[in-house]
Amino acid sequence: MVENLVLGIGVTALAGALATVAGAAEDTESDIGSQGDPNSQVQLAPQMGYIHRIYNKAISGEPPAYGLWCALGAGIAWAFMAINLNAILALIVGAAVAVFVQGVYATTAYLGRTASLAKFEQPVYIDILKSVTTVTMAHAFVAIFTTISMCYLMVAALGHPFPLPLLGLVWGIALGAAGSATGNPFYGKERQYQEQKFGAGVPISASGNIVRYAEAGERSSLDNGWFTSKLGGPASGLCFGLIVFFELWRTVLFEPFAGGWGAVIAGVVVILIFMVIDRFVETWARTTFGPYTEVAAAEPEEAAS
Amino acid sequence: MSALGGAAAGGEGINPTASVIGIVILLVALGITFFIASTGGAVALIGIILGGALIGFGVHFVPVGGAPAAMGQAPGIATGVAMLAAGAGLAGLFGGAWAAELGFAVALGAGAVGGGLMMAITCMMVNVIYVFGMGIPSASGKVDKDPITGDTFPEYKSQGTEGHGLPFISYVGGVIGGTLGGLGGTLIYLELLAVYEAALPVIYNAPLEEILPVAVSLAGIFAVGMFLVNAVLTAYNITGTIEGPHDPKFKRFPRAIIAAAVASSVCGMLAIMVVAL
């Protein structure tokens, strides 16, 4: 009993750590490939006359895309395990095959979306296709491999009833949801609109005027990955890691109590704790930053004009 | 997209003709299921319809700002309605399915809490990014005062935006939405699992223990599929972005509940007929 509990807690911690890496890699991949909601500005910019060299592969949201890739990776790994291939090797092969699908998706998405902007004189850059696609694939491999490894732990060590491919789909969608929710604002506001004032939203009148130049030459999507991996990526990782950890932790540790209701009660307590933390963050911002004054509020508008 | 100044699409009221047609379709689906799979199948279908309606209702609570939120131009979480709700609901389904052997009520509770937990953590991290990464306080664009905390918003809204971040009312809405989504998804899963556990051993002439993985897989994949159907359907009702229960768009929920119930009845009928025919 105690040994099972210790194993369960160890697996929970490992799954949480894998989820943290997955979240960070997912957000960085989506920022380099520009797949999240901020890509609306990448698509909009040429229509407003701002030609750029940013990658553009937001042909679907991150949750369904990662749902597909993780389900695919997990499904292939599951098939290899069924013919008695070593589990680690099967997971690597599954993730590798899924990444090739991601690469095809990224290539066709970039070509298709960018070509649709031809009438606004936005060129398709082949060097971008060659240099950025492989980088997004590398990050996607990390995200997919860690997610399906985490799913494998849930099945093999914790005894979850869902088969591996279905868990890949479920957690792939959750990964994309957590990563896009947490990481998108940082990529959208802080990176694409780096010229706008810190501490305020982007005025709607500035839409499409994304930053297109770097210290030397034109900004590359790889620079965006470098920037967002400082906060947006780790925060997304922390978000997904906390979700997976607490989801498993409350079940592994508290399910034996009160006929299963222990895990439910523990979950409610954890929700209330996060609610208090959120309220603290909200009030801290209000008291520390204070309200916008007339002068401060006018500045973003000036910057946009 | 309302943040770009466009008018909100879609009417506010319920279309009586469409609703009557929908309810007729629902009753026909229920009748066919009763005819083919007897009372057990019909009761399961009622549970599935209820689960679908819960998902449709729950999605309205989830604060989603889409692309404008990613630029701090509108409040909410910077992703799509259906996808965020699906992420939370499926995390709940994961917990509910895990607890299925402990009984119906416990599994429903585990599913609900799983969805709520996912949203509680995600919403908190969204505010952490806005506050500590971007230096932006929360401000609603739809109301001047938070109905729960009484915080005022107009002076905390930066110029040229509709608001930003997640006010506390939106946070609470997110948790309620995740909870209802997890509850609805788990209810659909449990109803389908009961149908498959009863039917598959007879079809394959094998003991339940051998058939269980097939039953779990089938119920799980149908539950995920029906969750997505209901979440996407509700996203059409919301049309773009919503701040949570205080948003005027929230009042559209009765229409989504009818649509989700009708869609769930047809999807549920097909899922039951897989083993009943």
Image (cartoon, grey):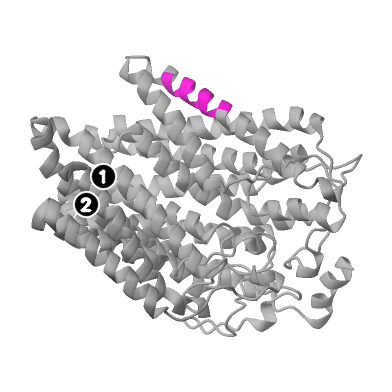
Q: Is residue B272 left or right of residue B240?
A: left
Give the residue at x 31% y 65%: B261
Q: CA distance from mark 2 to mark 1?
A: 8 Å
- Secondary structure of the residue carrying tag 1 is helix
Q: Is residue B249 left or right of residue A188?
A: left
Q: Is residue B120 left or right of residue B243?
A: left
Q: Whole-percent x and y of residue A34?
A: 68, 45
> Label 1 sits on what residue type?
Ala
Q: Depth check: B264 or B171 in front?
A: B264
Give the residue at x 71% y 69%: B4
Q: Depth check: B10 or B231 in front?
A: B10
Q: Is residue B62 left or right of residue B222?
A: right
Chain letter for mark 1: B
Residue A187 visible in the picture: yes
Q: Whole-percent x and y of residue B206?
A: 9, 30
Q: Whole-percent x and y of residue A141?
A: 56, 29
- Secondary structure of the residue carrying tag 2 is helix
> Label 2 sits on what residue type?
Leu
In the image, the segment drawn in magenta is A90-100
**Mark 2 touches mark 1? (CB < 8 Å):** yes
Q: Whole-percent x and y of residue A24?
A: 58, 41
Chain letter for mark 2: B
Give the residue at x 30% y 29%: A156
Q: Depth check: B32 or A84 in front?
A: B32
Kindly indicate whether the residues beneath marks 2 and 1 are on one polypeptide chain: yes
Mark 2 lies on residue: B190
Mark 1 lies on residue: B219
Q: Is residue B184 magenta?
A: no
In the image, residue A15 above or below residue B116: above
Residue B247 visible in the picture: no
Q: Earlier in the sequence, mark 2 or mark 1?
A: 2
Crowd tier of the residue under label 2, counting other residues whose Cα lies within 10 Å: few below 14, some 14–19, many 20 or above: many
